């Protein structure tokens, strides 16, 4: 988990980009979390939204885990309307690609909107769900869906 945390931290300050899934062009929330999961061999196949990641790990992860490194934190109106995902760094803090939205398409947009990968306290907003991927399978071939 130390390697995952170090990997996540290197992206702090990377611009947010709607639909983004790489460190050169920028990330949106789900693209960033998928990149972190891919580093552990746990990224579900396909390009998932925050809702898609919730749906997958709701079936294949630990529900209502204690807060801690690697726990996925989901935000939205309801469990069927998840709009944001972040990853916990410890019991109190998350790392997220945040501050942007569907109009954040360029680095200049991200600068204007103060949208980037950042660390925030868990209490910054109220999560609707928390799930822990099965990190015990790191190093075991992941079969996806």
Image (cartoon, grey):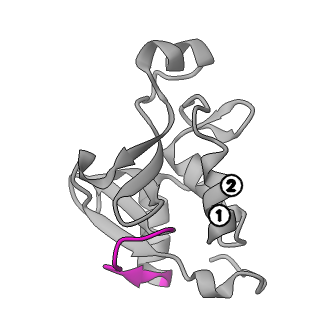
Q: What is the secondary structure assignment of the residue under circle 1?
A: helix
Q: In this picture, is 112 found above or below 77?
A: above
Left or right: 133 in relation to 2: left
**Magenta span of residues:** 60-69
- Numbered label attached to residue 18: none
Quadrant of the rendered image containing residue 7: bottom right
Residue 120 magenta-highlighted? no
Alpha carbon distance from label 1 to label 2? 5 Å
Name the one closer to the observer, 145 or 142: 142
Give residue 19's position: percent from left, percent from top. 58, 37
Image point 54% across, 31% down: which residue? 16
Q: Quadrant of the C terminus?
A: bottom right
Q: In this picture, is 60 found above or below 105?
A: below
User: Can the viewer see residue 127?
Assistant: yes
Image point 65% across, 72% down: which residue? 42
User: Can the viewer see residue 35?
Assistant: no
- Numbered label attached to residue 7: 2
Q: What is the secondary structure assignment of the residue under circle 2?
A: helix
Image point 48% across, 49% down: which residue? 95
Labels 1 & 2 near each other (Cβ < 8 A): yes
User: Mark 1 = which residue?
Assistant: 4
Name the one closer to the observer, 69 or 109: 69
Give residue 71's position: percent from left, percent from top. 45, 69
Q: Please tell me whether the stretch drawn in magenta is mainly helix, strand or loop.
A: loop
């Amino acid at each position: 988990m130390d390697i995952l945390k170090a990997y996540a931290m290197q992206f702090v300050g990377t611009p947010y980009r709607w639909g983004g899934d790489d460190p050169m062009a920028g990330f949106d929330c789900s693209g960033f979390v998928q990149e972190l999961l891919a580093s552990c061999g746990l990224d579900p196949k396909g390009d998932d939204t925050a809702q898609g990641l919730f749906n997958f790990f709701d079936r294949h992860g630990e529900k209502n885990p204690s807060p801690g490194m690697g726990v996925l934190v989901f935000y939205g109106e309801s469990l069927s309307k998840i709009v944001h995902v972040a990853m916990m760094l410890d019991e109190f803090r998350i790392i997220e690609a945040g501050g942007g939205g569907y109009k954040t398409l360029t680095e200049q947009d991200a600068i204007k909107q103060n949208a980037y990968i950042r660390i925030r306290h868990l209490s910054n907003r109220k999560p609707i769900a928390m799930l822990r991927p099965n990190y015990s399978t790191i190093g075991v071939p992941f079969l996806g869906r």
